[in-house]
Image (cartoon, rainbow, N blue to C red):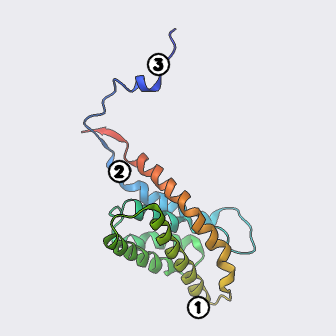
């Protein structure tokens, strides 16, 4: 039996022309990835202070910066509601803050259409800091008694985790656009 051909030669005869991505896969992958990221509070992690970054929010920002027109402006409402169900925040806080974030990222996209990764990281760091501070403020209005210093480890981890979230989004973006369907 002859040895198998290298991968490059195996793909040589396969048709690449007249192929398109599956519409269901292309449309649902970003939504599902953000929703899976919102399930991060279910991780079995025990800490005396908040340390786990809001992965759903990081993924939302990364999708919006990688593919600006992918999510509609109203996407913050259902995704924020899903996040509110698992985050432990008062119901409606993520709906409001995620919707404001979507609008702010749309305004930034109009103002600065060509950005480098460093500017995206800087913008996301400011949005993440504002998001965490506003969630603390909303939680304190709801009866919490926490100071801002308790958020510093979570803020640092979230800002430093953003490049990883952007990389994961990039990988899933390539996955969702694989040409599988014949045209």
Element type at mark 3: loop
Q: Quadrant of residue 50?
A: bottom right
Dot 3: within a 10 Å radius of its alpha carbon, few (fewer than 14), some, or many (20 or more) residues? Answer: few
- The residue at the point 69 percent across, 80 percent down is 150
Residue for badge 2: 24
Instruction: Tell me: residue 161, above or below residue 78.
Output: above
Cβ–Cβ below 8 Å for labels 3 and 2?
no
Element type at mark 2: helix
Instruction: Tell me: residue 6, above or below residue 182.
Output: above
Q: Earlier in the sequence, mark 2 or mark 1?
A: 2
User: On the rendered image, what quadrant is the C terminus found in?
Assistant: top left
Cβ–Cβ below 8 Å for labels 2 and 1?
no
Instruction: Tell me: residue 114, above or below residue 89.
Output: above
Dot 1: within a 10 Å radius of its alpha carbon, few (fewer than 14), some, or many (20 or more) residues? Answer: few
Distance between the alpha carbons at the discs numbered 1 and 3? 65 Å
- The residue at the point 58 percent across, 62 percent down is 161
Q: Quadrant of residue 141?
A: bottom right
Residue 149 on image: x %, y %? 68, 82
Residue for badge 1: 141
- The residue at the point 66 percent across, 77 percent down is 152
Residue 86 on image: x %, y %? 57, 70
Residue for badge 3: 5
Q: Earlier in the sequence, mark 3 or mark 2?
A: 3
């Amino acid at each position: 039996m002859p040895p198998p051909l290298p991968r490059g030669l195996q793909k040589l005869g396969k048709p690449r022309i007249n192929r398109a991505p599956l519409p269901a896969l292309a449309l649902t992958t970003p939504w599902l990835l953000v929703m899976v990221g919102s399930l991060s509070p279910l991780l079995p992690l025990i800490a005396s202070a908040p340390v786990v970054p809001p992965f759903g929010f990081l993924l939302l920002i990364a999708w919006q910066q990688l593919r600006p027109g992918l999510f509609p402006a109203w996407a913050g409402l259902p995704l924020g509601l899903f996040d509110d169900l698992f985050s432990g925040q008062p119901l409606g806080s993520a709906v409001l803050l995620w919707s404001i974030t979507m609008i702010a990222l749309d305004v930034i996209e109009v103002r600065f259409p060509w950005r480098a990764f460093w500017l995206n990281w800087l913008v996301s760091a400011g949005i993440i800091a504002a998001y965490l501070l506003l969630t603390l403020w909303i939680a304190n209005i709801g009866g919490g008694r926490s100071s801002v210093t308790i958020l510093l480890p979570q803020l640092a981890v979230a800002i430093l985790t953003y490049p990883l979230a952007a990389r994961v989004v990039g990988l899933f973006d390539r996955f969702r656009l694989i040409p599988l369907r014949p045209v």
